[in-house]
Image (cartoon, rainbow, N blue to C red):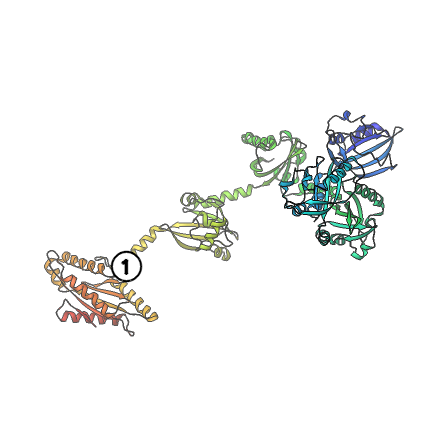
Amino acid sequence: MDVEKLVKCLDFLPVGIILVGEDKIIRWANREAVRIWGSDNPEELQGKPCRDNFCPSDSCPILEEGQSFDRSSRILIRKDGSFVPVLKATKILDLNGERLILEAFQLVGDDLYKRYFEVVSENTGAMVLMIEKDLSISMVNSAFLEHTGYSRKELLGKPVTMLLHPEDLPVALERHKARLRGEPAPSAYEIRVITKDGRVCWALVTPTVIPQTHQTIISALNFTKEKEARDLLESIFLSAPISMWLAQDGRFRLVNPRLILNMGYSEAEFAEMHPLDLVYPEDREKVRRAAREMLKGRRTEPYEFRAVRKDGSITWDLGMVTSVTFEGRPAVLGYIMNIERQKKLQEQLALEKARAEALIENAPLLVVGLGVRSKILLFNRYAEKVTGYRSEEVLGKEWIELFIAEELREEVYEVWKQVVQRKAVVHEYENPIVTKDGSRRIIKWYNKVITEGSEFWMVLSMGEDITEIRRLEEQRQMMLEALPNPAWLISKDRKIVAQNQAAREIFKSEEGQWCWDGIWSARFLPEEQKRFYRETGHPMPGTRCIFCEADQALREGKRYKKEVEADGTFWEGWWVPVSKDFYVHYAVDITHHKRMEKELYSLSITDPLTGIYNRRYFQEKLEEEIERVRRGGGVFSVVMFDIDHFKTINDQFGHQVGDTVLKTLVKIVKDRIRRIDILARWGGEEFVLLLPNTTLENAKGLAEELRRKIETLWIPRVGKFTVSFGVTEYRPQDDPDTLVFRADAALYEAKREGRNRVRAA
């Protein structure tokens, strides 16, 4: 075998490889092995003994036990003295006449073991704590805290001796020291624990020393009451999220539901089985050795093995065992965790890589890989389609020089530097690129910096061609700006997508706001929706203004309009669907038209001289009052009155003086009547009053009061004048004509009897 070629090949493999002689001296190590060891100089490892420089174990399966091949997990000593877990494979080779051991290994993430330990300790009802060599507590699980009443803060860093009964302390310390020295010590024993509130609890403790760190993991069962201990054990088995079993005398005594579910055997079948019956035949000896080492405290990491289910299927698992006492006799407690997923990781990674490559090539996005100085390293089919270039034409060329217009290169280069150096978080950006035919396309880029170790390797840029989107957005904005009134493009869920300048200036709304909040400041929401939005910061489903017609417009595909008044301004709102998910909402200021309309209406119902209602308006209100009383019951009265000898006043003093007399009369009456009363000019000097909820007697009293007040007035040039009144009350058979006729007849009677008096029909 050509050793030089072999070494050259092995030096670039992504796994650590060392060659060791039968004298346990390291002959050679590849780059990855040196890196994992913690150095960058291969010569530092060569010539060193593997024992204490690379391997903490005295036992070597190849040299001591005569195996030709070994595959297992182990602990590796790094240059700085720290320990790291690895998976290794070891094989005997003959190179140039020398018998050498080739060992290949790969780091195993601490997370797997950490998660395994946390799951075991935190999900078991047993008390578990870890103590350092100096007896300080470095880890304690929730069960221990629950049993003793302490908090983690009160225990972590404190000496474990504070928990032990004074009488048990000397024996416990002596056994602890013996275990650290590697001398025989009981694997489980009883001890008294003092809780925070001073109670004494008896516990069965099982200490396990980790040789590499000199830490001790102590699991304990509280058997102050035998039944409680039994219930606790059953609780562990029933609720544990991993497979658990307890064996005694070479047979399963207890199995939890998870193990039954995973392996497919019944509880009765397990009772006739040995724990090794679950192990694939070729792995049984390896599992037997690992379990023995663990029970003796010489191994702490879980062991890998293949398990055989009842249906014959095989799964990869991790196993762990510990010594316990069950019903007063020694037993073995075991845990099994499935690692099938980890075992298939390599295959999955290869598959994912193939899928990623297929996805990159067939993705409807530009996928470009850019190296140092924006050199193109990757260029997919869609990039070829958009730019017009073939990949072989651009690979190795600088992206910025080839695709960015000269006037934009400096700006794009600054963005590029920020992405590469990661001085700013630039997740995405847009810029135009120049295609092969000279046209420009607008691309929205999404970037991912890919590094190898701490060194920059490539920027993976994925680009979306948004040229048409931006063109449509410009057209949409031009359409909105063409509208002379405030206008918004709003989505189906009532978000403002775009708006014109008039909307920004008049309503101060912003893109991205809810339309009912950005335009109307939530003032037209129902109270329940408004309160929910203010309290939670997000709207209830279906939140909308009480006048909104957007849903109707989108559902029917036609436009709707409605008038809205806000702060004294009247708006004509329009909802015009432009697709099934968007509509244009615009508002026309119709305040001027509404005011003109109001003025015209006011002129149509008002007497121009006196400013009171005219005859037409009075007749409308009289009809409404008759209908109201017929429907709901009640009374009302009508009073008709006019100025006595008014023609003489006009003839003697002129119409201007006559108008003054009319206005004076109106003011006196208006000042006396209620807001619900209707005063109208019937014609000439004749007036009429509609008095809701007023009886005939009360109406007569009002008329008499007005008559007396008027006859005492003095008007310049005219002097005094008088008024005659006719009063009547509504009767069930009345209509407007009969009521007015009866009031007019009463007025005529007052005139006939001498004027300046009140008469009732």
Q: In the image shown, does 247 or 232 lie closer to the viewer?
A: 232
Q: In the image shown, does 166 or 756 lie closer to the viewer?
A: 166
Crowding at mark 1 (Cα within 10 Å: few <14, some 14-19, many 20+): some
Q: Quadrant of the C terminus?
A: bottom left
Q: Is residue 591 visible?
A: yes
Q: Residue furthest bottom?
A: 733
Q: Is residue 661 above or below residue 12?
A: below
The answer to whether residue 124 is left or right of residue 68 is: left
What SS does tag 1 mark? helix
Percent x, y of residue 581: 52, 52
Q: Residue furthest front?
A: 167
Percent x, y of residue 209: 75, 39
Percent x, y of residue 657: 14, 57
Q: Quadrant of the N terminus?
A: top right
Kind of residue indicated by mark 1: Ser
Q: Is residue 266 visible?
A: no
Q: Is residue 543 above or below residue 648?
A: above
**Where on the picture, by quarter, is residue 639?**
bottom left
Q: In the image shown, does 608 or 493 lie closer to the viewer?
A: 493
How many numbered badges does the structure rendering display?
1
The answer to whether residue 590 is left or right of residue 199 is: left
Residue under label 1: 604
Q: In the image shown, does 341 or 57 lie closer to the viewer?
A: 57
**Where on the picture, by quarter, is residue 688?**
bottom left
The answer to whether residue 237 is left or right of residue 601 is: right
Percent x, y of residue 592: 33, 50
